[in-house]
Structure formats: C-alpha cells, structure tokens
Image: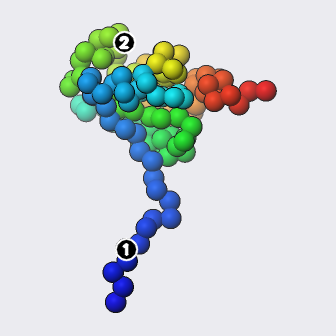
Amino acid sequence: MSTRTRTPAHTVAKPTRTTDGRFAFDVLRQEGPVLVDFYASWCPSCQHLEPVLDELANEWAGLVRIVKLDVERNRATADRYGVRGIPTLILFEGGVEQHRLVNVVKRQRIEDELGDHLVTALGLRD
C-alpha cells in the first residue's frame, strides 16, 4: 500500500490576514498592488463581501495581493488611514494609497472601480 498523499491539482489562493504589527510588511513593503479589506467580524456588509474577495484573491493570484485587517483588533492602522466606515477597500501600490472604496460589496463595482488602477499598476496598458 502506498503512503503517498494526493496533492490538489490547483491550490486556492485566499486573502491574507494582517495586524497592526505586520501591516508594513504585509502591505506597504510589498511589490505590486495590494488590496486591503478593512472589516469587522460583526459587520453584515463585510460578511457579504468575504466570498467576493475570496474569489478575487483566487482569480487575481500572482497579480494582486488581497489582505484583510480586522479594524476592531487593529485600531491603530484603521485610524492611520482614516477608516470610518466598513467595509473599506484600499488599493496600495508601493506603499501608497491609490484608490479607496467604502461600503462596496458588489464584485462588478470593485472590478470597475479598480480596473484602471490595476491595469496601470500591472503595466498592462499600451
């Protein structure tokens, strides 16, 4: 009998969770675009957005990193970026905020709003 384990044919990418202490490493020092979801576990809109971000993390793997920050447990970072409503999505590039979406939970709107920024950031524009 073989003791080999099966390896999935496709690994699913998921958003990374970060904290106040790791934010600089996980977001600001990263190469390429990073989309940060500022959320709270009790927030219905945040809960509705979670599967959308899971899908995008998987589809955009290798192009855009998606990171989640719980504002209840990581107040310093939320305050530093003036997050007052949740969910708030902030796109960072080179450690600098490029675009912000507040209280958006529809995938199409996220893609529409961030499309131009991502195309530019990824160098896909002719």
Q: Is residue 122 visible?
A: yes
**Category of crowding for the residue at label 2, using alpha-carbon neighbours closer than 10 angstroms: few (below 14), some (14–19), many (at least 20):** few
Q: Nearer the viewer, mark 1 or mark 2?
A: 1
Q: Secondary structure at mark 1?
A: loop
Position of 117 relative to 124 (above/below): above
Please name the residue shown 50% across and 59% down the image.
10
The colour scheme used here is rainbow
Q: Which mark is residue 5?
A: 1
Instruction: Give percent across and percent down for residue 60.
Output: 55, 41
Image height of 46 relative to 83, above or below: below
* Viewer-side residue, 60 vs 122: 122
Name the residue at the left extreme: 73
Residue at left 37%, top 38%? Answer: 16
Q: Residue at x 52, y 21 (%)?
A: 93
Would you say residue 109 is visible in this rendering? Answer: no
Q: Position of residue 38 (x, y in %)?
A: 35, 24
**Label annotation for residue 81:** 2
Q: Amino acid at mark 2?
A: Tyr
- Amino acid type at circle 1 is Thr
Q: Position of residue 71 (x, y in %)?
A: 27, 23
